[in-house]
Amino acid sequence: MSTVLAHVVSSILPPSVAMAAEARARGGELAGWLAGARHTPRPSAERRVVLVAAADHGVADPGVALGAGHPTAIALAALDGGGAALCKIARAAGATLLLVDAGVAEPSHVPPAAVCLSPGHGSGDLATGAALSIVEVGMALDAGIALATALAEERLDVLALGALGLGGDVAAAAVIAALTGGDAELAPGDLRAQVAAGLAHLPPGATPTAVLAAVGGREIAVLAGVILAAAATHVPVIVDGAVTTAAALVAVRLAPNAAGYVCAAHAGGGPAAAAARRALGLTPLVAVGLGHGEGTGAAMALPLVAAAAAALA
C-alpha cells in the first residue's frame, strides 16, 4: 500500500450518524444517506459529475488492431460527441460528464478531452496470467485518488460512476467472486471458463490489491481510488453496473468506513453486481436494471439525489 493510499484510507471517517438520523426523519432514507455522507443537515447536490472510466482487458482482446473501429473507441467517440444517451441524461440531470482513459487499447482514438491516466495499457489476460502487476495496481489506485481529489477541490457534491471497455464485466465478475467467495457462475455465460481459470491461480486469502493484480483491471483500480478519495472528502458516490460496483467492493475492503458513502443506482449488472451489492449491504434505488454500467443508470439517479437535497434545504 502506497503512502498516499494509506493516508487516504486512514482519513476516511464513517458517515455522520446524527446528520443522517435528522435528515431521515425529515426526508426519508435517501436524504438520510446524503446528509450522513456530506456530514451536514442541509447537503448540497448542485455540483454533479458523471465520471466514466474506460479500459480494455486482455481476456477479451480481439487479437488485431481495430483502430477507430474498436468498440471502446466508438463508445468514447459517441460520448465525446454528445449524442450518446448518457450525454443527454447527464445534461438533463445538470451534471458534467468526465471521460477517463484508464487503459484503452487504442490510445490514438481516445478523444482529446478525456483524462489520460494510462494510455495504451490495457490489462493482461486474466485467464492465462496476472492482469496487472502489483505496482500497476498501486499506480492506478493513486491515480484515481488524485483525480477525485482534484474534482473535490473544484467543489463536488455528488459523483456518479460508469465504466466501459472490452472485458470489463469479466474482470469485474472475477474480482467480485474472489472477494465474496463466489465462483465463475457470476460471470457472463460464455466467459465463465476464463474467470474460473483466473480464480484458480489466486492465492488463498488474497488481499484486495492482490485480487486486482491477478484478475482485475486498471479501470476497476482507478475507480476504487476515486471512491476512496470521495469518501475521504465526504462526497457521496453512485455506482452503476458490475465494474463500478466491483470498484466499490475493493474500496470498502480497503477502507470499511467508505461503505456509507456508496449508493447503488439500480438492480442491474447481472449476478456479479448483485453479489457485490449484497456484500456491501446496498439497496438499489430502483429495482430494475438501467443501462449497461457505462454510467447511464447512475446518471438517472442524480435527479433523485438532487430532490432529496432540495427536501432538506
Image: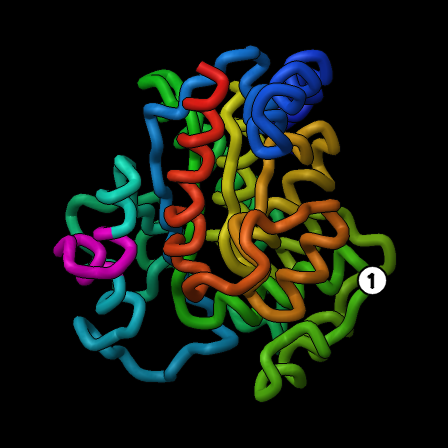
Report helix, strand or loop for mark 1: loop
In the rendered view, would you say 40 is above or below 223?
Answer: above
Query: Which residue is at 64% across, 40% downward?
Result: 251
Indicate the amino acid at tag 1: Gly
Please provide the residue range marked out in magenta.
Answer: 76-88
Image position, residue 198 (x, y; %) = 68, 72
Quadrant location of the N terminus in the rendered image: top right
Residue 286 on the magenta span: no
Q: Given the current orientation, which residue lies at the most extreme left position? A: 81
- Report whether residue 220 is seen: no
Q: Quadrant of residue 22?
A: top right
Residue 92 lies in quadrant: top left
Tell me, yes or no, if residue 22 can be seen here. Answer: yes
Residue 188 versus residue 251 in the image, above or below: below
* Identity of the residue drawn at 54% across and 54% down: 286
Residue at image mark 1: 181
> What sort of colour scheme is used for the picture?
rainbow
Residue 48: image location, x then y, percent: 35, 32
> Residue drawn 31% across and 18% down?
154
Position of residue 45 relative to residue 104, above or below, is above
Say which residue appears at 73% left-offset and 64% top-offset. 177
Q: Which of 283/61 is in front?
A: 283
Residue 81 in magenta? yes
Is 204 placed above or below 310 here? below
Chief secondary structure of the magenta portion? helix
Query: Around disc 1, counting alpha carbons within 10 Å, would you say few (fewer than 14), some (14 to 19), or many (20 or more)?
Result: few
Percent across and percent down for residue 230 are: 51, 28
